[in-house]
Image (cartoon, rainbow, N blue to C red):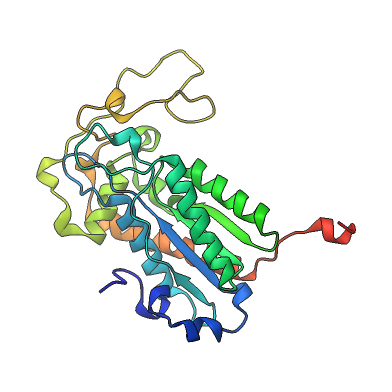
Amino acid sequence: MMHTFIPPDRFFPYLTWVDVESMPDRANVVVIQPVGAIEQHGPHLPLAVDAAIGLGVLGRALEKLPSNVPAYALPSLYYGKSNEHWHFPGTVTLSVQTLLATLMEVGEAVYRAGFRKLVLMNSHGGQPQVIEIAARDLHQKYEDFAVFPLFTWRVPNIAADLLSEKELAFGIHAGDAETSLMLSLLPHQVKMERAVTEYPQELPTGSLLSMEGNLPFAWVTRDLSQSGTLGDPTTATREKGDRILESLSDGWVQVIKDIHRFQLPQVWKSEGG
């Protein structure tokens, strides 16, 4: 099944060119490009975590989405910019230039087909800047093209209510939240007997600088972790994952509805250009 988690009637590649050409009000149809990664996620999780989470959340959201809201998922872009993990075997990474060029060319193809709303749904924390640059450049090139560089986890969700304070602060990779969600989506691919707890080590103290946030320093994963895990996956459960999946997908239903209704602000038109 090529569509994996995506409902078949919402999977863009299953359409014919005639279906696309005859689609009513293409300018307000929401086209979604999931962007993931193939990279290490500790000893216990598969390389496909980010891609799987993006597809799993999007698929559940599209199942819930009312039929009168037209939205379609493109095939996932499984590879991303993952060079922070490339010291761990199995990680496959694209360069910034390759990822950016790919997103630009996909966006241009979507635009040529008559669509004017594109979501770049990113599930990997190492590449939001690239996603944002692609979105801005596509809109700058095509002034009537609304492009949304969105991160899968930033819709309203209950994950913060289920995690410890330490996990919220430092559990950024292969920790409780990602492991719980994978236990919900792909339980047979999770090797909980291998799970280890490891939080970032040797971080600066008494300093304005931090691993992430307003004043970060550049790092690669092996600087901070021997196992590749940054967090505590041992507390993960499928029940937590099911709840996180439902709340994330509910958030995405609302976002897709909002995008369907969205109209680009173009003040310059009212001012005569």
Using the rendered view, name the quadrant where residue 221 is placed: top left
Name the foreground residue: 112 vs 65.
112
Q: Residue furthest top?
A: 206
Using the rendered view, name the quadrant where residue 63 is placed: bottom left
> Would residue 29 appear left or right of 201 to someone viewing this image?
right
Q: Residue sitting at 58 percent across and 69 percent down?
A: 112
131 lies above or below 57: above
Name the foreground residue: 5 vs 108.
108
Q: Residue furthest left?
A: 193
- For the question of whether residue 267 can be seen, the reply is yes
**Percent from the top left, x then y, of residue 216?**
48, 25
> Would residue 219 appear left or right of 240 to someone viewing this image?
right
151 lies above or below 107: above
- For the question of whether residue 155 can be seen, the reply is no
In the picture, the quarter occupied by the N terminus is bottom left
> Would residue 189 appear left or right of 79 to someone viewing this image?
left
> Would residue 200 appear left or right of 19 to someone viewing this image?
left
In the picture, the quarter occupied by the C terminus is bottom right
Q: Residue sitting at 45 percent across and 65 percent down?
A: 250
Name the foreground residue: 69 vs 113.
113
**Percent from the top left, x then y, of residue 187?**
18, 58
**Percent from the top left, x then y, of residue 248?**
42, 59
Q: Residue sitting at 55 percent across and 61 percent down?
A: 108
**Percent from the top left, x then y, of residue 19?**
49, 85
Q: Residue furthest right?
A: 272
72 lies above or below 134: below
Total numbered badges shown on the rendered structure: 0
Q: Residue sitting at 61 percent across and 68 percent down?
A: 116
